[in-house]
Every structure is written in structure tokens, then in C-alpha cells.
Amino acid sequence: MPHSIPASTSLRSGQSLHLHVSRGVVIVAMRGDLTIAAAPSWLGEQLLQQRFFLNEGCAHLMADSGWIAIAAHADAEVAFASEHYRRHSLAQVLRAVLAATRQLVVKRFLERT
């Protein structure tokens, strides 16, 4: 049964979000720093779990499907690009991520003025 993921969500400092993602989903740290704990996998007889650290404005393309945990180091906002990006080139995915980052920069600039 496919699960739907939100377009974006906010996390408080120390809060974690556990959800199932499909291969090809792009996760963007719109505000704050995040840690992504990928789905565990086996290597030989050892269970491994990769962790990825995202600073504000950075993105990560999920290489595998599975249950992940996203933890916020401070108040944060995380955005997700849906699974349909799997059919697009890396350049198209990067353009979408850069557009989201550009919106964040403009929003921050307008808040300061």
C-alpha cells in the first residue's frame, strides 16, 4: 500500500519524523539543520544504517526505499519532492531543489526588510 508524504513539515528542536519514502524522493532542509537516518540494510552479516547531515538549504536524494527518521537539531522545516522525480534527469531534480532554495532566500530577505 503506497504511503503519501507531506509536501513539507515543521519540526521542533529535538523532534523526529519517521516515515516511509520511495527511492528517488528529494529531502530539502528549508530551515535549520537535519539528520536523516536511512533505512537499515545488511552488509554481509552486519546491519548498517547510514546517516546524512543536511545544513539549511541542502538537499538529499534518497537512493533506496524504506523507513527513515529525520531529526531536527533546532527548529526546522523540511520539504519533500515527490516520487515522480524518479523519471526525470538529475538536472531537472536539481532545478526543482534550487527553486525551493531560492524561494527560501527571498522569503528570508523580505522578512528582514
Image (cartoon, rainbow, N blue to C red):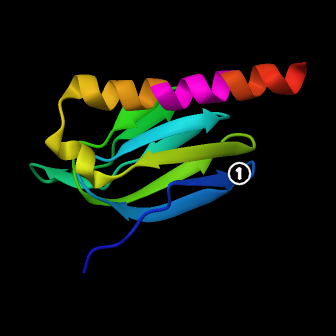
Report the quarter where the C terminus lies. Answer: top right
Magenta stretch contains residue 15: no
Q: Residue at x 88, y 21 (%)?
A: 112
Main SS class of the magenta portion in the image: helix
Q: Find numbered disc 1 in the image and state the secondary structure of the residue it sits on.
A: loop
Q: Is residue 92 left or right of residue 31?
A: left
Q: Is residue 64 above or below residue 60?
A: below
> Where does the magenta region start and end?
99-105
Determine which quarter of the picture holds residue 95: top left
Q: Which residue is mark 1?
A: 14
Q: Is residue 56 above or below residue 75?
A: above
Residue extending furthest left? 44
Magenta stretch contains residue 102: yes
In-front residue for pair 12/109: 109
Whole-percent x and y of residue 12? 74, 52
Q: Residue at x 52, y 46 (%)?
A: 79
Report the quarter where the N terminus lies. Answer: bottom left
Whole-percent x and y of residue 24? 25, 45
Task: Classify mark 1: residues with Cα within 10 Å, few (<14), some (14-19) or many (20+).
Answer: few
